[in-house]
Amino acid sequence: MTDVPIPARYRCGHVHEPREPATELDGSCTQFACPACQLALAVQQGKNTRAYVNMQQISTGMASFVIEISEATAVLGELLATQGFARSTPSQDELHPGNGLAATLAVIWRKEFQFAVDIHPEFVLALMEVIKNEVRALSAYFPAGEQGVSFMAFPGDDAGLDHLLFVGQGGMASLWADS
Ligand SMILES: [Zn+2]
């Protein structure tokens, strides 16, 4: 007799199909209902869950890519908490990040990927690839799917620290679009 592998299942009972490329999400997402069930819940609750990926100046010499998720359901929030996201207020722009202190106003989930601004561009591009894979995996939980992901945008509005850092390459938006 050969062993038939037992498929991993989400809490809701649906089978977990690992994504390619794998992301950290695969490790803990089966503790929760599957993307389709969570998406149905979001629609039922009238939530247009969205991700905003942007870059912010954290301190002199340090910048950070930031993923901000708005209008997450409570269960998606629990999942995001297992992925290094924390509750925060929405960022206004690249110089005015949200913060986790104003708890009553903390309506988004925030995750930072910090780097030194003088680091090699290859590292920054590799980091962008990791972040893109992560938000694509998360977009399976959004009613709008990948259309619910905005790069170089803020829950409030757009901005342009990238213009300072990436002026020679046509701005960050084109770099996100390239690969
Ligand atoms: Zn399900």
Image (spheres, rainbow, N blue to C red):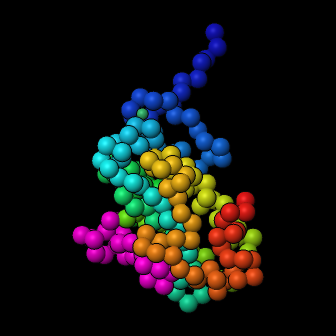
Residue 163 lies left or right of residue 154; in this view the side is right
Q: Position of residue 170 (x, y in %)?
A: 72, 77
Which residue lies most toward the left here?
A: 104
Say if 97 sits above or below 88 in the image.
below
Image vertical order of residue 8 relative to residue 173, above or below: above
Eyeballing the image, is 152 above or below 37? below
Magenta stretch, residue numbers: 87-107
Which of 147 and 132 lies nearest the eye of the viewer? 147
Residue 163 lies left or right of residue 40; in this view the side is: right
Magenta stretch: dominant secondary structure: loop
Task: Identify which residue is drawn at 47% across, 80% down.
Answer: 93
Q: Which is more toward the observer, 147 or 175?
A: 147
Q: Residue at x 62, y 80 (%)?
A: 162
Q: Residue furthest top?
A: 1
For the question of whether residue 129 can be seen, the reply is: yes
Where's residue 28, x and y in %?
47, 45
Work out whether residue 166 or residue 83 is closer to the camera in this orientation and state it.
166
Tell which quarter ligand 1 is in.
top left
Magenta residue check for 75: no
Quarter of the view holding residue 164: bottom right
